[in-house]
Image (cartoon, rainbow, N blue to C red):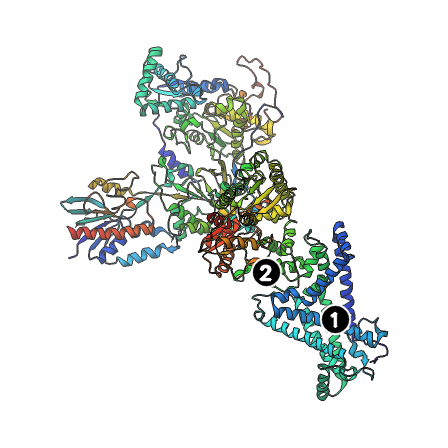
Amino acid sequence: MKENVVIIGGGVAGMEAAKQLLTLGYNPVIVERSAQLGGHVAGWHKLFPDMSSAQELVKGLRRDIAEANVFLETRLNSLQRTKSVYTVELNNGVRLTSRAVLIASGFELFDASKKEEYGYGVYDHVITNADLEAWMNGREDNRIPAQPQSIGFVHCVGSRDLKAGNSQCSKVCCTTAIKQAIELKERFPEAEVYCFYMDLRLFGKKYEDFYINAQRDFGVHFIRGRVSEVGETIDGRLQIKAEDTLLGKPLKVQLDLLVLMSGMVCNPIAKQLADKIRLQIDSDGFLKSRDNIAAIGESNQPGIFYAGACTGTKTVPETLAEARAAALSIHTYLMNQ
Amino acid sequence: MIYEGKQKIWSDYQKEIPDDHWYYVRSCIRQNFFPASERMFTEITRNVLGKDMYETPFHTTCGGIAYHADTIPQETVMTIVARQFALMTEAGYENYCPSCITSFGNYAEILETWREFPELEARIRENLWKACRREFNKPKYLAHTSDLIYHWREQIREKAKHLLINRETGEPLRIVEHIGCHYAKMFPHKGVGGAEYPYVLAGMVESWGGEVIDYPERRHCCGYGFRQYHVKANRGYSVSNTHKKFESMEPFHPDAIITNCPGCPYFLDRWQYVIAEQTGKTYGRNGYGIPVFTYEELAGLVLGYDPWDLGLQLHQVAVEPLLDKMGVEYDPKAKYLGLNKEDLMKPEMPSSIKCC
Amino acid sequence: MIDRIPSGFHPFVIPFLAGMSFVFLYCILGVVKIIYELSWAERRKLFLSLINPKYIYKNLRDIFLDCLIHVKLWKRNKLLGYMHSSIAFGWFMLIVLGHLEVFLFVPGRINLFYYPIFFNYFVAEDAVTLRGSLLFFLMDFFLVIVLSGIILAMIKRISSRLFGMRRTTRPSVMNNIGLYALWAIFPLRWLAESFTAHISGGSFLTVPANYLFREFLGNDLNMLPTWWAYSIALGVFMFVLPFSRYMHIPAEMLLIPMRNAGLKIRSARKGFARVQVLSCPNCGVCIDACPMTVNRGNVKDCTVYLTRQIRRNNERRIDEISDKCLMCGKCEALCQVGVEGPNLRLMQRATRSYRISPDFRDIDTEPMIAAAQGSKVLYFAGCMSRLTPVIPESVLSVMKKAGVDCTWMDRDDALCCGRPLFTAGRIEEAKQLVAKNEEIIIRSGADTLLVSCPICYKMFLENYHLPGIRVVNYIPYMYDLVKQGRLTLRKSDVCYVYHDPCELGRGCGIYDEPRKLLGRAAAIAEADKNKVESICCGGSLGSLSLNFQQRERMTKAALDNLYTSRADAIATACPLCKATFARYSDRPVHDMAEIIDART
Amino acid sequence: MTDFGFHLSKSSQLDLSRVDRERLNRLYELEPGARICMTCGSCGATCMAAPYSGMSVRKMLLHIERGLDVKPLLSKCMLCGKCTMVCPRGINTRNLILNVCKLYD
């Protein structure tokens, strides 16, 4: 009889951890709220820096965890600890016991309509990064014009914004914006594409190359300054205002499409879990690791482990690496008990 | 424009507005700018809607203008405001409605500050006591008078004689709503509809049959900006901001502008003349400007009051084009007759903008 | 020797006559046009030189040595030298001897200028002349010389590598027609003269051929067609000449007197520039010389293509070629004819019109003048040295050690020397900077202007008017200090290779002092290409349009050349070379000043 | 026209929709490096003309891309090339400057 390890969340973190746990000889049980595995990544189109397919990544992971137990469209009713065993009750009546629980609840995209000034949901041609990925994956979106002449990207929507309740940088939006700018430029070569940024944070492997490519090969314009407000002109175009902070001058431009780079906020489920078993929340609103350097995948509770964006904004490779690390941490923990 | 998106936001920003028993406070400057507006407010609320609207001649300025012009410190303003609240408390009211947007913003700001810093409130109570031996209760409800008209908009619609509909075409009139900056920009939750898409005036326009125009510079200041107008050296900046708004709304061809702030209608009205003098450009049809109204004036027109009783002859931009569209009857000859029917003489007319 | 044809005429001479007349007329008109395009002062200078015996001698000597013997080419490449001089000198001798024959044997025909060319057709041998006479022998001898040259030319066309040329030019259509016509002329002449040799006589080449042909072909019917062919080949060559590279033959004869008279290129296309352009023989030496052609790149941007595009009036390409050049001067230094590629480009750049022009006249120089006063020696480091501060610091340190009281003119606020604007063709703007700097230098009270940047140095030498002030480069100056015993150098074991900066070496002719100075401080090794053949570091301000990636390749190629010396370190005397090399070099790069400072 | 003692002031707001794209694209064509500036400011820091005209290639590029006048900035450029030497992205700033001088006024 293989030992159960309950994994909360069936995104790439949960799947990767399940894959490793299967190899290590455990019986991972994934509890996923939605109807499919893959989490946010399943909704993305291409992943930077090599423009590899997000679908392929998710498909591969799904194949790898075919032997794992997966509960889709399932929620936790309760999570309780008795001595060193956690009892998990699901809303479908299933009761699981497990000595280790991995929280891989991930993030939630910031609700762009909260930034009312950008008019998401109010103006006809304002979309989010996630909408754009879905469109590139084939979903129809009549907010995206057939032949846009000018397109804007607003970085840091709901990130680095105390007024929006998020002080943290969402880390991936700069690169995502550049990636999406390039993808739109490929589809609409005639369009002028403007990226409105506060700082460009292109920290990862080959991300800076992305930036140069966008400038040199695609002519994407980068404007340092946050968009302050969006209005609609008589012909239904968007007029945005910003300050060019490098020139110290106010600026406006008319656009046919505005893409809001919604940042990451901690999935509220993580907070509910935290209440249930007294996990700590860090100052950035994400789950607090036992140690942000040495033990990012461990909680303050024995047997509760973390992987991925539940502890902070992460890229996909970081998430996968953490999932692998968490699997090993769980294994070590269970062996030593 | 996705109307449902706006409705969702409007539903997020609603405030509780009691239906009756208000302590009414006038604005310092509205009497001079558009003298009939405040009188029309009391007329409509008391006589048409039958509400209890208490007023006392002992109230003063709230200090907002001086505060925003950086001439008096905050504690002074707070003490003045505390006295206003004391008058309300003494009169036995707990619902406070100022006619001025800056006052409304001022009160909202002070109440919020006291909520955050109770020790400050205690000090102000002490100041007030030392100054004039008065004590006060904070108002239970604070609403701007436009909030009240908004609140009673459907009752006004029921009694309406004219709607905001072009009588000839049957189309809704296209109205620009301009909200005073101090209404909700500081505290979005204090305003009906929030700061980005305020509903307080839009709601009136919609109820009375008109259509609201959402133009790019909708959020922009009217140009008054206190210091910008009061200091003559800055006045060019003031009019430039107004100009920017008109340039932005021009392609939409608005039939009228409705405002809820003392300064806004004044500057949107008068600067049209100055802009026409300086650039030769007018923004209405056939050389006319775009008529600018306070919400009380518009409510008065909807309820069928005589335009000249509403003081519309004191507008710089001619209101007649809108009256014609709405089908409001008026006697052009009576425009410059005083209350005693004596001829006040027609003022000199500018050449750059048609003023009837 | 007697006239064989009483009329002294045959229609086959017509192609030659027509071609010759055309060339003659074309050249006369061309000369008139060029003279007309010269300024009054230039014209005066030229005419005065043409009546000066000293210049006449010099012109004749240069034309003989350069145009006929190709002395410069001999020095550079013996095979190419032989090829060119065999054709040019051999042909020249055939013409001279032909005239001599006419003069000696049929003096009555001396006025027919096709006669010496087709002499063998028009005459019959009589008893007076003997078979195998000296003239016949000489004619055949020079024909053999020319034919050997033609054979070499054919081989070169097939494989230029055999001649030590890595790359050569791609001939245009006109050049090809001219080339094939030229190749055809001499074998045809040999055939024609051979067919006629039993009548007109001949020597070791034509007479045996005559026997051979007569043995096989039997009759004289082949005679006329070969003479026709010979004349046609000549005619074609003459007609093509003005439109091909062979124009360099007459043009060079004008170039030499003009250059000797001291004319300079002052216009982009006209006058002396036109002569320069026409004088380019399209040999392609500049292609291998050019530092831009590393990895087969930019071949079409070498001087040979500039002259070609100027002749074609291809404005777009002219602009591109003019803007790209590093202006290192190597093509000019190695050019056999002396075509001034960089100057042609500079004048081309100077024709550009700009909508924005800088104006430096209102810059206040008083603070700079005040800062420059105080010493007899005024030191100018230049803008670029601010990015290599070790250079000015070392120069000043060496001066201090030698007891030279020296003021640093551009320590704080300073103006550029003007050379970058000058080489960009913005000459008027550069002059404004020159005027400003002249004022500072003159009012500083110094009598010596010490310059460490060779770019500035060249500008100060050539474009500044500084009466009573000696402009000196820091290397000769330091070497003098060493010779005077004011500086004592300790020799180190480090082996340096000295890189000649373009502006100091080819630009100002300073090759030996740096080596002598460096030799006292360290061991020296030489790179494969050095001195006049030194390869530009790629950082040159001369180029306007070369981008970073293209320059990177050039810098690496220049470094590879320096590495051939197997030296431990690289020494140079230019802030730009130092900074550029340092970017990619696998060994230390030091400025001369640094080395001298360390060894004193 | 009445003199009120005050005048409409020119808007300082930049309108990107009105930038001359054709001319800008021509500039990009002539000097592709114009696209890749990352506004680090090295050029301005090293500029010999900066003390006289506030010149910086970064600023010049921003002015052009936003449709502002570049003439005053360029009025003291000596084309010395230090900006080319220090540019971390290897932009051929001199070619850029010369082409700006050709295309803009």
View extreme (front): residue: C485
Instruction: Please report whichever mark, 2 or 1, sits nearer to the chain's N-terminal start.
Output: 1
Callout 2 amino acid: Lys
* Residue C414 in the image, given as x and y percentages of width and height: 56, 39
User: What residue lies at 14% left-to-right and 47% top-to-bottom?
Assistant: A84
Q: Which of C403 and C497 is in front in this view?
A: C403
Q: Which of B130 and C228 is in front in this view?
A: C228
Whether residue C316 sits left or right of residue A314 in the image: it is right
C-alpha separation, residue under disc 2 versus residue under disc 1: 31 Å
Q: Mark 2 points at which residue?
A: C300
The image quarter containing residue C111 is bottom right
Say if C431 sits above or below B85 in the image. below
Q: Name the residue under label 1.
A: C235
Residue D105 visible in the snapshot? no
The image quarter containing residue A112 is top left
* Residue B17 in the image, given as x and y percentages of width and height: 35, 25
* Residue B111 in the image, given as x and y percentages of width and height: 34, 23
Secondary structure type for disc 1: helix
